[in-house]
Amino acid sequence: MNLFDFTYCGNYNRQIQNLSRMVPEKWSFGDSNDNGILKGYLEYTFKRVYEEGKICINQEYAIFNTGLFNHYYQPVYAYFVPNLVPDRQEWFLDGFYTEYHLLKTGITNLPEKAEYVTNPADLVFDTHLEIVPQYEHIFGEEENAQRLPENVRNSSMKVQLFDGALRQTRRMLEADYKTAIPQYYNHSIQLLIPICLQSPGRPDLALACVKTADGARYLGRTCLTLKMAYHNARLLARLESSWLHP
């Protein structure tokens, strides 16, 4: 179930603007003001809470916990009322409200936020383990290869360039294990690490790593653009003072 099958959102851009004002964070990439990060966050969060059965629904309203907090760290909820337009979605997005506002109106059964992490150890990168990249996927599949900088993609030395960048990444991880940023993807936690192919300390891509079944090494499954990586990582937590930013 996606958000737009569940509800009619009316002026969705205005609703998202209202939410962005409630939640102090940079929600657009670069100089854009489209709130694209927030839209992606909200739509993926809805899918997750629907999957977990965490949407509170009765005859009068439906509510889900956005997982976001206002300036005062009060939880923010999406609130829906029955859609009065026939042959449309069952619900209409009334707006986004704080915990206080909903409790004041007499709504006390407030749902929990989405859960993604079952083992906190999955959030920490083990710097003792080897990283084995999946080069057939990173270089061999056209869609993935297009994510590489053009000068690297067309180089006959691209594997050597990537290996050199990965060695620098390992040093970054050894200096600060928090360099690895967790992301939620395909119902699992992966760790994103920066790959600096053109300039030291300036990431071009994020390599998504997952432990092998025996926990003896990491597989570098695919490279993501920094925008893709940010969308996935923001589902878990607000990102501050990291190499991955909008």
Image (cartoon, rainbow, N blue to C red):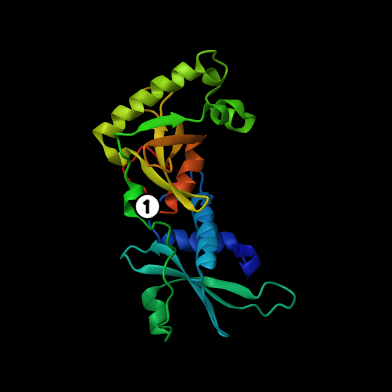
Residue drawn at point x = 45 percent, y = 16 percent: 160
Q: Position of residue 177 (x, y in %)?
A: 28, 39
Q: Residue 124: x and y, percent?
A: 31, 45
Percent across and percent down for residue 107 are 43, 83
In this picture, is 8 found above or below 60? Answer: above
Amino acid on which disc 1 is placed: Arg
User: Measuring 39% from the left and 53% from the top, which residue is drawn there?
Assistant: 25
Q: In which quarter of the image is the N terminus?
A: bottom right
| Total number of numbered discs in the rendering | 1
Look at the picture and state if 138 lies above or below 235: above
Residue located beneath label 1 in the image: 238
Whether residue 198 is visible: no
Compared with 34, 220 (above or below) is: above
Tell me if 94 is positioned left or right of 173 in this view: right
Seen as rendered, the residue at the extreme top is: 156
- Residue at the left extreme, as displayed: 175
**SS assignment at label 1:** loop
Residue at image point 33% right, 62% down = 71
Q: Residue furthest right?
A: 87
Residue 111 appears in the picture as rendered = yes
Q: Residue at x 37, y 52 (%)?
A: 238
Residue closest to the eye, 61 or 1: 1
Instruction: Work out whether residue 5 or residue 1 is closer to the camera in this orientation and state it.
Output: 1
Relative to 116, say whether 151 is above or below: above
Query: Quarter-wise, where is residue 101 in the image?
Result: bottom left
Q: Residues within 10 Å of mark 1 (few under 14, many from 20)?
A: few
Name the spot of residue 164 as percent of width and height, x first: 39, 20
Q: Residue furthest front?
A: 214
Quadrant of the rendering where the C terminus is positioned: top left
